[in-house]
Amino acid sequence: MPAANSSPRWPRPTGNSQPMGPQTRFITSEICQVGGPGQTDQSDAAIYLVHFADAAVLIDAGSGRAGERVLMNIEAAGVQPEQVEALLLTHCHYDHSGGAAEFRRRFGWQVAIHELEAAWLEAGDSQVSAACWYGDHLTPCPVDRRLAGGDRILLAGRPLEVVHIPGHSPGSVAFVVDSDDRRVVFAQDVHGPIHAALRSSVRDYRASLRKLLALEADILCEGHYGIFVGKAKVASFIERFIDG
C-alpha cells in the first residue's frame, strides 16, 4: 500500500492508464512479476508468479481492476491460468486482495491468507481493507486456507515458508522460497504505512522488520518500492524503516 496521509482517497484511474502489451519481469528463472503499476493498473500492488515444474502460485491479486492484464502477463510468462494452484495473499488490503474473489470464481484458485485477516476478506470489509481509500469496495472472497507463521506451502514438492510479520496489518505475512540458489522473500509492505484504520502496530512493525532482516534474503520482492537484489541492498532497504 502506498504511503498515506490521515484521510487518503485514491481515485479510480481514467484514460489510457494501462500498458498496451504483455508486461512480465523475470526475477529468477522461476519467479516473475506479472502485475503492478506500469504492468497492470496504478491501483495494484506488485503481483508475483512462482512457477515450479508444472505448478504455479500467484502472490497477491492486485485490486481487481485489471484482472485480464494479470492473466495476459501470466500467460506471457509461459504459465496457463489452469496451472495456478493457489493465490497467496500477503494481507487483506485492497491493492493486494481486491482481485482475489474473481480469480477464485473463474479458476478455482485456492485462496490463502493469515488467520487474523481471513474474516475481513470473507466479509468484504472495505474499511479495514482500505478499499474505501480507493473509492471502491472489497468483493467478499471465501478463504480456503488460513495461514499461520511457520506454515509451509508445497508447490511441486518444494516449500514456501510463511513468516508472520504483523505491524502494517495484524495478519501480514512474508513468503520465503529458494530459487536459482537464492533466498527470495516476498514481503509486500515493508515500508508501511502505519495507520489506525489498518489496525497497525508500531511495536509489531519494528519487530517484524528485524525478523525480515534476520532472514538474510538474497532478493526482496516488495509491494510498491520494487525488487531488491543482493543481501546488502535488501538489508539497507529494510533498515531505512526500523527507526523511521
Image (spheres, rainbow, N blue to C red):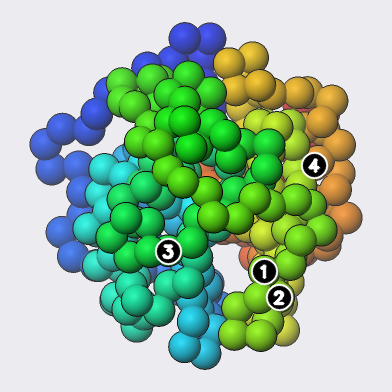
Furthest residue in direction top, as rendered: 7
Which residue is more in the foreground, 195 or 230? 195
Q: State which tag comes first along the sequence, 4 or 2.
A: 2
Q: In front: mark 4 or mark 2? A: 2
Cα gap from disc 4 to disc 2, whole angstroms: 22 Å
Label 3 – label 2 distance at C-alpha: 18 Å
Q: Whole-Å distance between the Cαs marked 1 and 4?
A: 22 Å
Res. 238 image quadrant = top right
The label number, if any, that marks residue 209 in the structure image? 4
Instruction: Give yes or no for contact between labels 3 and 1 (Cβ–Cβ under 8 Å).
Output: no
| Label placed on residue 95 | none
Give the crowd class for mark 4: few <14, some 14-19, many >=20 residues within 10 Å: many
Q: Which is more foreground, mark 1 or mark 4? A: 1
Q: Measure how far apart labels 3 and 1 are at the Cα level.
A: 14 Å
Is label 1 in a helix, a strand or a loop? strand
Q: Earlier in the sequence, mark 3 or mark 2?
A: 3
- Residue 159's tag is 2
* Residue 165 screen position, x and y as percent: 75, 43
Residue identifier under label 1: 153
Image location (x, y in percent) of residue 5: 52, 14
In this image, 217 relative to 91: left or right? right
**Residue 132, placed above or below residue 208:** above
Q: Secondary structure at mark 2?
A: strand
Identify residue type, mark 4.
Leu
Do the numbered discs 3 and 2 sit on residues whose CB atoms are within 8 Å? no
Asked whether residue 128 appears in the rendered view, the answer is yes
Under tag 3, what secondary structure? loop
- Which residue in the structure is indicated by mark 3? 109
Amino acid type of the residue that numbered disc 2 sits on in the rendered structure: Pro
Identified at 61% across, 36% down, the residue is 117
